[in-house]
Image (spheres, rainbow, N blue to C red):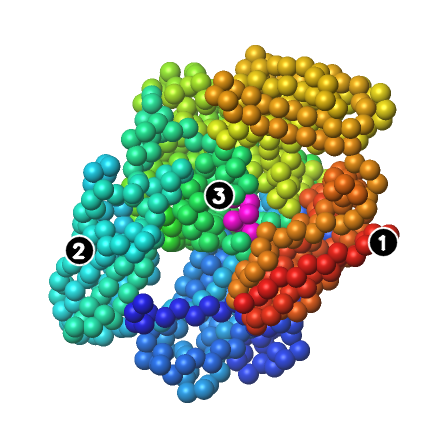
Amino acid sequence: MNESRSKIWLNAEWCFNQGDVPQAWYKGYDDKAWRKVTLPHDWAIEADFSRDYSSGSGYLPGGTGWYRKHVVLPDRLEGKRAYLTFEGVYNHSQVWVNSYYLGKRPYGYSTFTYEITDLLAYGGAVNTIAVKVNHAETADSRWYTGSGIYRDVYLTFTHDIHVAQYGVFASTAEISLEGAELQVETRILNETGEAAEISVLHTLVDEDGINAGTSVELLPAAGGTELSQQVIQVKGPKLWSPEAPNMYTLITEIIWKGATVDEVRTPVGLRSIHFDPAEGFKLNGEALKIKGVCVHHDAGCLGAAVPGDVWIRRLRYLKDMGCNAIRMSHNPPAPVLLDLCDQMGFMVMDEAFDEWEGVKNKWSTGHNVYPPKHFGYYEDFPDWGITDIQEMVKRDRNHPSIIMWSIGNEVDYPNDPYCHPSFQTMTGNNDANKPAEERVYDPNKPNAERLAVIARRLVQAVKACDKTRPVTAALAYPELANLIGYSDTLDVVGYNYRESLYFKDRSAYPDRVLYGSENSPGLQEWLAVRDNPDICAQFIWTGIDYLGEAHGWPIRASQAGFMDLAGFPKPSYYYRQSLWSDTPMAYLAVRRAEEPGISDTGGRSGGKPSWNWEPGERLIVDGYTNLAAAELYLNGKLLGVGRPDESGELLLSWEVSFEPGTLLLTGKDGQGRTVKRELHTAAAPEQLRVTADTLQLRANLRDIAHVELDIVDAAGTGVYGAEVPVTVTVEGAGELLGLENGNVQDLEPYRSHTRNTHHGKLLAYIRAGAVSGTIKLTAVIPGLPQAELEISSL
């Protein structure tokens, strides 16, 4: 690879202090006593849970923190232009380099970059980066945000003639199986101060490194900015789709005086997208239902500081469930997550904001418990909103996974704060929980007509950066949004939980693309998409449980997900899999006869994957399968047969009296396919089974091993009801990042190395260190044999 452009990751060896230190911006400040941390880092997740903090953000603190990093740069970089990039700091960050103040960034989810060319020292000198993070008020969000530098940080060095940041934009103009036309726009900066004749060379290579097309243009680049627009013809393109996420690499070279002075590599996916009011969504010309979930940015015990490997595991589970799309709710995600969506085949709704200039209610003593607090991004939106949304679009616009830009989520929430005289009593989502005075029109509150004005500005800002994708928003109260013209500003219109309006509004607005931008997981909500060609999508709330939006102490997280905080699938995951996945599957969920099933809870919960009950107890056994028919056996005896499609809930249920042994569900179809699922009665716990998803890591401070710890009996059957403390120690060439069991009522501090199992399971996150060697994990449970595991770090 050409060495004209260098990138230095700065995640290691930061000095951290929680609390304000007014002199910490000063290069000469003595930080030797500060704690050493590795980025990404979230200081809030290490604290004690307390009901004194906001329920909305998971009963964890904010506050002020300082980070300092000392860097010695190689002399070979002297004379190059230097840029310092932060992928996410929550929030209100201020940055200094060598005592020089660079600026601030209020929004905690934006990626931002400062040029620091003239501020760096070489020749063995130490450079000091200082960052103040001021997350003073935790009740500034409706979900957990984290606190600190919770995403990656890096330096980029370039020649004086170079591609500008986010300066390459590649989009597919024409595409078919025979050929594709890739349009490439390149913005070049000439900071030599003199005119320079340069060549801009683009080479597209496939995943095997085979040249798929080239284009070259000669530009007389005077001092300043030049714009190159070229077209690459690709024969027989490998198209990108969720089923086949084929990727290319676009290599852009700037050639001056016969030498390559800059080289940028851009991942590219060749695909076409089209939204049609009557025919729904088409990818590469083929109709496709968008089976999406909403996802927040935290990961249980890791807080907001989530390594890429953790997302890989979670995305694999979602893929296996049949999910093909992710809504990034409700803020710009980590770049690594978008990279993985490209590589693993997920379509993405990239979303910018949860509030604009009108502040939303922030629950601090339980979800929808009055009175709320009123902090948040609204105070910074007037000055920063356009900057932040354009930063998101320019940063992310080369990702083939992204099919929509969302400018906001539920900013039209009734009386929160906008209202309108046409609606004297507002009846939106969850309005029954509001006090009467909060549901009555108040002329002294902001008029909702303002929303259309702001929306037009945001849409214009997005389209100034990218016209190849539609702009959308998630509407809480479509009746209002349609009246005031807010909906008319959007290319495609998302409805949150308003399936009841689909038929009426499709008739009233026949030229409008309408879809579900946020939905409950019930069967009827899915059938509204599956059985209507003009409704192309749903995004279920949510794919994974998340910290915050808590309903009240001691519950500290939302339990809306198909997977828990540890990323372990719930029974609702398998019911959804039976509706969405084409891969043969079967699953058993057991409940007492008087307890609600999955259909009674709107697809959210019901039953347990356990066959340990009282002798003779009356039980309901629910069977989920995507095959045509299924049979239920208990200890080899056939109890019943059935077809899911003959059930109103597309599942099978049998009433069974408990007896110990083996419960078996066998799914079958007319094509000879069969699939089985068994539950065994577990005996007393005998051992702790320890398994890892990998036994080899790279010594890079980034790689993660997921270690599952299961309580099992002598036969190896999991003991679902086991809730026992496990103490985990990690020695050698790695560290324990955290322990997660998925129990939203477990208030043990996440910094502890002891945690109870939940449903007989516990997950440990192990991160590789910077030096190769062996990582040894030891797990101890009172009364059971000690368990050990070794992982190599190379």
Identify which amino acid the numbered label 2 is placed on.
Answer: Ser
Q: Quadrant of the C terminus?
A: bottom right
Q: Nearer the viewer, residue 152 or 178?
A: 178
Q: Tag 1's secondary structure?
A: loop
For the point 57% across and 36% down, the residue is: 542
- The magenta stretch is 310-315
For the point 55% across and 41% down, the residue is: 317
Residue found at the very far bottom of the displayed protein = 123
Residues at marks 1 and 2, CA–CA distance in whole angstroms: 67 Å
Residue 621 appears in which quarter of the rendering?
A: top right
Q: Which residue is mark 2?
A: 215
For the point 36% across and 70% down, the residue is: 6
Whether the magenta-drawn stretch holds residue 32 is answered as no
Nearer to us: label 1 or label 3: 1
What secondary structure prevails in the magenta region?
A: helix
- Does residue 794 lie above or below 229 as drawn? below
Residues at marks 1 and 3, CA–CA distance in whole angstroms: 42 Å
Whether the magenta-drawn stretch holds residue 311 is answered as yes
Residues at marks 2 and 3, CA–CA distance in whole angstroms: 35 Å
Could you tell whether 569 is left or right of 794 in the image?
right
Of the numbered discs 1 and 2, the one sitting upstream in the chain is: 2
Q: Which residue is mark 1?
A: 782
Q: Is residue 145 visible?
A: no
Of the numbered discs 1 and 3, the one sitting upstream in the chain is: 3
Could you tell whether 38 is left or right of 255 in the image?
right
For the point 80% across and 19% down, the residue is: 657
- Does residue 26 lie above or below 182 as drawn? below
Q: Quadrant of the N terminus?
A: bottom left
